Amino acid sequence: MLGDPAVALTILVLSLFVGFEVISKVPPLLHTPLMSGSNAISGITIVGALLAAGSEERTLSTVLGFIAIVVATINVIGGFVVTHRMLAMFKQKPDRS
Amino acid sequence: MSDSLIPLAYLAAAVLFILGLHNLSSPRTAPRGNTLAAVGMLIAVVATLLVEEIVDYTVILAGVVVGSTIGVVLALRIQMTAMPQMVALLNGFGGAASALVASAELLGYARRGESPEGVVPIAIVLGVLIGGMTFTGSLIAFAKLQELLGGAPITYRGQQVVNAMLGLGALGLGVGVALHPLDLNLFTGLVITALALGVLTVIPIGGADMPVVISLLNAYSGLAACATGFVLGNSGLVISGSLVGASGIILTKIMCDAMNRSLANVLFSAFGSVTQSPGSPGAEDRGTVTGYTPEDAAIIFSNARSAIVVPGYGMAVAQAQHAVRSLVDELELRGVRVKYAIHPVAGRMPGHMNVLLAEAKVPYEQLVEMDEINPEFPETDVALVIGANDVVNPDALTAKESPLYGMPILDVGRSTYVFVLKRSMNPGFAGVQNPLFYNDNTMMIFGDAKATVMKMVEAVREYS
């Protein structure tokens, strides 16, 4: 998909900049959900795990792929669910009149 | 699915991830952000499943079912006080997944007898190295936070030398694997070295430095995913991995700044080990400390108009957040204006205190950052320090010989009265005495934070 490494490197550097810009705007209040949420995003490796586990005949790669799917899925699902749970707790002050 | 549609699906996923993170800039939009990111992930996964190379879905289905079950159970059961452990564990799994995928790719090349070309061997090395270190390092961090291991730094003679040798070994093996990717002995050596490095570099880091370690492991898990992206030539992984890497790097920097220490110092100095508190004067030359009671506090509170609560790790350990909220409710009913002062490194991970107080339904407007609240202490009647120590140590401002010197603190001593809730007179994590406790306007209340706060609630009800 990414033939030229220079293209991948370009994508990498630009994404890092986008990341720095976006994340420096997250207030300290939300740093824990930021960690768990970004954690879930790093579970994108699941894509690689799916390819490793599903592509060929059963080999050691398949076994590694299976374990990779399990841990990556824990990462993705666990990360998004726990982030959701946390974010649901942050409430504004109710009007006390 | 056609070959150009799949990269477009990854692009859509990446855009949703960025929008998701962007929405985390406010607690109001944050839940939507999390949903957007989750949808992005779903798109990426579904698109991948439609790739022609995937012929066998049974293994995939089994893995996803097992992983989802464990993930959901963990996420729903975990207590908010245990969130640092949870995040450490998730980091570790992310790193493990990346290392496994890179390994599986290499084994695939080896079986086909073809040599990976271009940047792929280097990316495989980085994926395995960073991913493996993230995995075992996170497990050690988890064990320390869960108190399966002691929180104190584990040190031994020659530790730095051993770690340096291991680092050089990893470098050498990495170069070896990059040059001879199909030599599986070299590769096995690299895997083992990476796993050992993760363990040995995290054990000398003390409990209160965990916010830095967790942030750094967060960055690693992203960078490992990024490396895997180069292995697979997959833009989706490269983009998402670098977003997470950027997030971890920023948080690491914020945490280091909040302790006025360099990353190298945090990682290599075994800060907080017993041997390392030179020059800090002992308790005996500071005078004595009188213990006060929750009733004394209630009397002071009955005349107070403003108060600032300063929570620390002790509040999390005692699970005192709900009791604290009850106390603040009582005080507010009696016309006291109350805010919470949150130090960036209070607790064991970035934002730890905010999550605990949010769990106790404290409105987030009341949670104030350090720089914003520090000017308010001189006009505040009562500062209530609950299980925090080093983050309120005035030596950090004045005592050049103190190991804490230069660390920004919450300047609680400038309020009219200071109550410090503490288990005992044991020094804080840094092993440094805290002169705040000996100030004339400081009153110590010893005991379990939760029990003490609950007694305060009763006393406040009685006295006014």
Image: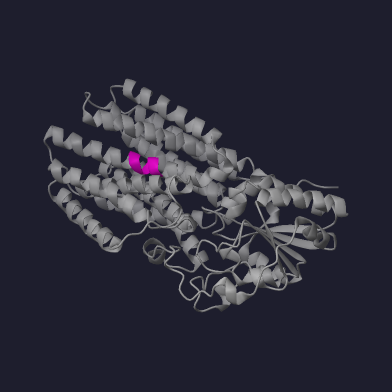
User: Toward the viewer: B237 or B70?
Assistant: B70
Would you say residue B123 is visible in this rendering? yes
User: Toward the viewer: A82 or A50?
Assistant: A82
Judged left or right of residue B337, residue A60 is left
User: Toward the viewer: B62 or A52?
Assistant: B62
Can you name the residue that lies furthest to the right here? B464
Q: Position of residue A20 (x, y in %)?
A: 46, 57
Q: Is residue B96 magenta?
A: yes
- Residue at x 40% of width, y 66% of height: B265
Q: How is the image coloured?
A: one colour
Q: Position of residue B241 (x, y in %)?
A: 38, 47
Judged left or right of residue A14, residue B338 is right
Judged left or right of residue A33, residue B297 is right
- Residue at x 42% of width, y 24% of height: B65
Q: Is residue A16 magenta?
A: no
Q: Position of residue B337 (x, y in %)?
A: 79, 59
User: Toward the viewer: B162 or B397?
Assistant: B162
Question: Is residue B340 depicted above or below B221 in this figure?
Answer: below
Judged left or right of residue B67, residue B378 is right
Instruction: Name the quadrant of the N terminus of chain B.
Output: top left
Question: Is residue B212 depicted above or below B117 in this figure?
Answer: below
- Residue at x 26% of width, y 41% of height: B102
Identify the magenta region.
Answer: B92-97
Would you say residue B4 is visible in this rendering? no
Question: Is residue B132 depicted above or below B421 in this figure?
Answer: above
- Residue at x 85% of width, y 57% of height: B335
